[in-house]
Image (cartoon, rainbow, N blue to C red):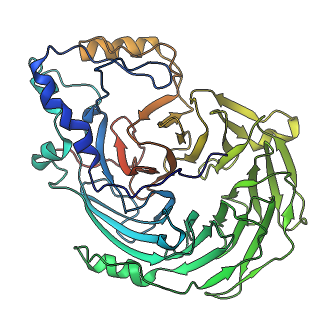
Amino acid sequence: MVRSIKNPKKAKRKSKGSKKEDGSSSSNSIPSLPAKVWQPGVDKLEEGEELQCDPSAYNSLHGFNIGWPCLSFDVVRDTLGLVRTEFPHTVYCVAGTQAEKASWNYIGIFKISNITGKRRELVPSKSTGNDSDMDSDSSDSDEEDKDEDGGSGAPVLQLRKVAHEGCVNRIRAMPQTPHICASWADTGHVQVWDFSSHLNALAESETDASRGPSNETPLFKFGGHKDEGYAIDWSPLVSGRLVTGDCKNCIHLWEPTSGTTWNVDANPFVGHTGSVEDLQWSPTEPYVFASCSVDGNIAIWDIRLGKSPAASIKAHNVDVNVISWNRLASCMLSSGCDDGTFSIRDLRLLKDGDSVVAHFEYHKQPITSIEWSPHEASTLAVASSDNQLTIWDLSLERDEEEEAEFKAKTREEVNVPSDIPPQLLFVHQGQKDLKELHWQSQIPGMIISTAADGFNILMPSNIESALPAANDA
């Protein structure tokens, strides 16, 4: 149960690229050494060594912050297109701060436009000639994007702020009506907000008019929880239906009575013996949701069957921090816990006792976020306190012939450690104290993540999608 950001300081407005590439020019005066894959938690940095980001591993990579660190955020569905594959991109998000003083907190409603990048070849082309192309690949990605199909210039951040009482533990936008958002506060209150005016203003403007947080009244405020909490989820099937869980093991069901009011059942669902850490509605059953807890259990609930779980699973021997229900393969539920492991369960096997179909022990610190891809049923992303964001494809198996062919095409020793799981597609580093990640469901291959030192937008170059690809010149 690792959640809070300790001693938060106001983030510096400095791009991730400047931190990564500033040191590259000074290294030109010393002999270059072969690049090596560095394994966090395994390898140690020697004196004088530093980690460098390889821009060629990304189709797009950008960093930004909105002031104070954010423990939670959500991607806001927009009207710019259901499947967008061409740069530059635009995204909308809501995020809640973890400020130094309770009165300094706010919800940030923001738009990031001109997200540049380019589609990269996974294997270098044959007509490279010497190593000049490798040198250009290591330069700042924004510079080389100027003459590519990805546009030019840096991304533009437009931010509007709404004052929030206390730190925001978690925030979620309603899928059906994305300008309606719910926030869990460390004061013990859950509030529902209407951010339509802010989102409309961002959509109509291309420049940021900075101003302080505005004081607004939420649409609805519930103070019936006995403690603060982190678990919250909107139903993807019933507009306005919500569940919230607290640190005192209680889960409350919210049913909408109109567009601006809710009936919150005062009689909670109780089945856990510890804090409820996460909640997920079924993607196919409107009355069914799942929960996980520090008691190590995952529970499946049917709101038609009373206030006790329909099924309870001893999922892990430590706190279960996060769960994610696969919306493309609704029988699959993933869970991540405090010892750094995460598991995949096939809910069709619950009656047989052992429903685990995959279990991974790669991460060295607690899992803080896990989410299935909205575009590939076998792919999921995981964030951990070990400062790694990893992407996995459960359909993959090790292919020695394919690995040998890849090394031959790259004409160099790749130096990939042999003990890396074959299902591990990608490792993203550079953020400290990762807290939450989300796929951008309208832009295949894009992930947004938040950490103590700000946000990253990343599009790994080896994440392929079955959806139509952009036309390459």
Residue 22 showing in the rendered view: yes
Nearer to us in this view, 201 or 256: 201
Q: Where is residue 387 in the image (x, y as percent from the top left)?
A: 47, 37
As drawn, is 233 to the left or to the right of 55?
right
Quarter-wise, where is residue 358 in the image?
top right
Q: Position of residue 186 (x, y in %)?
A: 63, 65
Quarter-wise, where is residue 246 in the image?
bottom right
Quarter-wise, where is residue 18 in the image?
top left
Q: Position of residue 386 (x, y in %)?
A: 52, 34
The quarter of the image holding the C terminus is top left
As drawn, is 56 to the left or to the right of 450?
left
Residue 239 showing in the rendered view: no
Q: Position of residue 379 (x, y in %)?
A: 53, 40
Nearer to us in this view, 464 or 58: 58
Against 66, is 200 above or below?
Answer: below
Residue at figure coordinates x 83%, y 62% from the top left = 302
As drawn, is 189 to the left or to the right of 307?
left
Q: How many marks?
A: 0
Residue at figure coordinates x 53%, y 51% from the top left = 5
Residue at figure coordinates x 44%, y 22% from the top left = 39
Residue at figure coordinates x 36%, y 13% from the top left = 415
